[in-house]
Amino acid sequence: MDSTTFKKMILPHYEEMYRVAYIILEDRHDAFDAVQEAVVKLWTKREELEGIQSAKGFCMTTIKRQCIDMTRTRYRRNEPLDIALENDEADDDIVKRIDQRDTLEKVAQLMDTLPAIQREALRLRAYSDCSVKEISELLGITTYNTRTLLSRARRQLKELYKHLIR
């Protein structure tokens, strides 16, 4: 696929990709970065794009995944990684924070075992603080189905966690 065809196919969806990214990331600069990264990924996969049915759908899926990756990276970056350097805190407080970090890591690993749509909905809700309506729009499902999806994901995550800590 040449650059002219790519521009005609992808660039008409640029603004909508930005809107989706902004809804998820809630930051203009991060949303802009996400769209840029997504377009670069689409460009590198341009040969695969020739056979797709819906350029818009492919663009929206790409931007959602890019935002989730950025949210995950941001979440990991904000974790308290070097607790030992915090001299002011008591030892038991440090132990509590280490336990919390371990628990968060376990939950993140358990989330990876959920079905893709449940995992995506739960991450949008938990990490990006998206509303049920925003999630339903991003996933292309009704708000009722979104609530059901989130409920099932939480229930399954609780069960998985119970089995893990036994």
Image (cartoon, grey):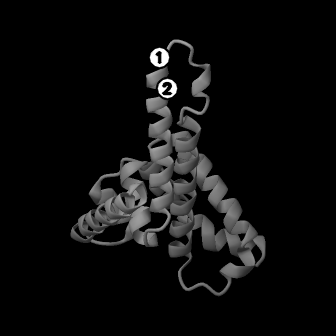
Q: At 56% across and 76% down in the image, what residue appears?
A: 55
Q: Where is residue 29 in the image (x, y as percent from the top left)?
A: 56, 40
Q: Are marks 2 and 1 in contact (CB under 8 Å)?
A: yes
User: Which disc number belongs to residue 76?
Assistant: none
Vertical arrangement, residue 96 with respect to residue 134, above or below = above
Tell me the quarter of the image containing the C terminus. bottom left
Residue placed under numbered mark 1 in the picture: 90
Vertical arrangement, residue 138 with respect to residue 58, above or below = above
Q: At 36% across and 47% down in the image, what residue appears?
A: 129
Q: Residue furthest left?
A: 144
Q: Which amino acid does label 2 sit on?
A: Ile
Tell me the quarter of the image containing the N terminus. bottom right
Q: Position of residue 125 (x, y in %)?
A: 36, 53
Q: Where is residue 59 in the image (x, y as percent from the top left)?
A: 56, 68
Q: Which amino acid does label 1 sit on?
A: Ala
Give the left or right position of residue 102, taking residue 117 as reference: right
Give the left or right position of residue 106, taking residue 153 as reference: right
Residue placed under numbered mark 2 in the picture: 94
In front here: 166 or 93? Answer: 166
Q: Which residue lies furthest to the top in this view?
A: 88
Q: At 69% across and 64% down in the image, what residue appears?
A: 41
Q: At 56% across and 18% down in the image, what residue appears?
A: 86
Q: Say few, some or many: other residues with alpha carbon within 10 Å of mark 2 (under 14 / 14 to 19 / 20 or more).
A: some
Give the left or right position of residue 23, taking residue 158 as reference: right
Q: Is mark 2 on a helix, strand or loop?
A: helix
